[in-house]
Image (cartoon, rainbow, N blue to C red):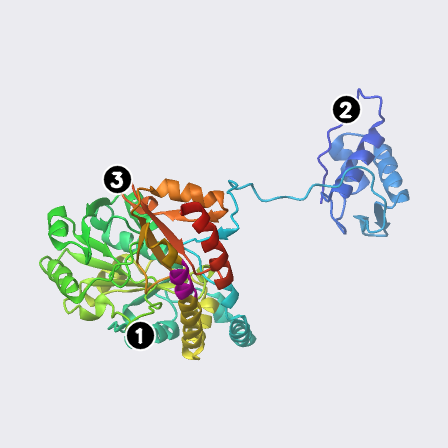
Amino acid sequence: MSDLTISLDPASAVPLYEQIYQHIKKEIQNGGLPFGKKLPSTRNLADYLQVSRTTADMAYSQLVSEGYIEAVPCRGYFVCELEGLYCPGPEKEKRKPPKEREERQYRYDFSPSGVDLNSFPHGAWRKLSKNILMDDNKKFFQLGDPQGEYELRCTIADYLHQARGVLAEPEQIVVGAGNDFLLLLLCSMFGTGQTIAMESPTYRKAYDLLRNLSNEIRVVKMDESGMRIDSLEASGADIAYVMPSHQFPLGIVMPVGRRMQLLEWAAKSERRFIIEDDYDSEFRYRGKPIPALQGFDREGKVIYIGTFSKSIAPAIRVSYLVLPERLMELYRQRGRMISSTVSRVDQLLIAGFLDGGYYERHLNKMRAVYKSRHDVLLEKLRRFHEICRISGENAGVHILLTFENGMTEQEAIDRAAGEDVHVYGLSRYYIGEVRQSRTVILGYANVPEREICAAAGRLEKAWL
């Protein structure tokens, strides 16, 4: 350190040496000059501040006598450690993160986006992390393949084939940090200004992202089987964004007949593609799992998106694309320039988690946990059968209640809030103009059984 920025006032009644001394002392007390920091020599300080060397010597002498700095022979002056030294005046205020908009905290929160973090497999995660980092492999800290580690892509391909009926080679898989990144990647491949068809209500985050990237979003009508093909055809869209295995938020499962019609629509034009968002297909409580739409595709029209955020934890941020063969050349031209957004260590950790059987055991555990909460919630909601209709059950981690006694969505939310219970309105997921909604969403992933029972009692007071 060659200088100190000190504002001196020659007209002040306080001597110049004392002004220097006070400034340096305050900087040391406040942490601006940390322990061990070398100070400029008295000659350099005097030259920099345009004062006599005697003035600088007097300031340093006072600081040395009080124990704030020490003189080391042949080396110079250094800041002393202040532990045990009395420092008058207020302590330096610790930096605090910027305040976020404060939201009310509820005793019971039926968030549809929650997951049960109490069941996170900490032991397996620590073991795998330790084993990977013990290798001391420098390549982990270099940029890897933009598509993701080949080991992970092989593991994902095997898992998808067995669990979801997805037909894919590791070369068709692209790993990214969350579905948001994967949608951004697709937009970089196709270019902006695409006409994309989406259902309403839908996953609003995907809608907002695609719209903000200058794509034109066309709202397509739905029925009990999902996206209507006649409405899709009339929309003029080239890309359809769907969630056929468990539509969010309505929970509709698209039947095989409608899936075939959707694939036929895509096959009519080279420009048409389907984005299949398979966000929570792992959780189904009645019947066999529904195979992915991609497994029925023989024309290379389905772009499959999967994620580990719902099945493991949101902070994992590992998702993946399965691109049809016909899009691989487009990806090589426009997509491979974008580096993978998931660290290589995390990728190998996920690969080990799947390959070692930990993921399968974790899924089995979580299915049991969520099914128990699902069953308890449905049992407690029986008392509401005269005022509302239940839908969206038997899959996912949320259900819908549609009131048939004249109560509106907002009235239901307000009454529940009066009992310190947070339920969510369906209207937040609609695109464009929304008719008055009478439906609320109850997510149960992060609400234990005993809290479900207690919350149901409060809802009974609020709604009955």
Q: Which mark is residue 9?
A: 2
Q: Which mark is residue 163?
A: 1
What span is in magenta?
373-380
> Which mark is first along the chain, 3 or 1?
1
Q: Nearer the viewer, mark 1 or mark 3?
A: 3
Secondary structure found at label 1 = helix
User: In screen coordinates, is 10 left or right of 248?
Assistant: right
Locate residue 270, reporting x and y percent. Answer: 12, 58
Asked if residue 19 can be seen in this view, the reply is yes
Residue lying at 80% horizontally and 49% vertically, measured from the top left: 78
- Residue 165 or residue 324, whichever sits in front: 165
Picture quadrant of residue 25: top right
Is residue 378 one of those drawn in magenta?
yes
CA gap, disc 1 to disc 3? 39 Å
Residue lying at 53% horizontally and 72% vertically, measured from the top left: 129
Q: Amino acid at mark 3?
A: Arg
- Residue 21 or residue 268, whichever sits in front: 268
Residue lying at 26% horizontally and 69% vertically, measured from the top left: 290
Q: CB under 8 Å between callouts 1 and 2?
A: no
For disc 1, the neighbor class at 10 Å (few under 14, some 14 to 19, many from 20) is some
Residue at numbered disc 3 = 435
User: In screen coordinates, is 6 left or right of 145?
Assistant: right
CA gap, disc 1 to disc 2? 76 Å
Residue 136 higher or lower than 217, as above or below: below
Picture quadrant of residue 302: bottom left
Q: Amino acid at mark 1?
A: Ala
Q: Nearer the viewer, mark 3 or mark 2?
A: 3
> Which mark is first along the chain, 2 or 1?
2
User: In screen coordinates, is 191 left or right of 428?
Assistant: left
Locate residue 149, reporting x and y percent. Answer: 39, 70
Secondary structure found at label 3 = loop
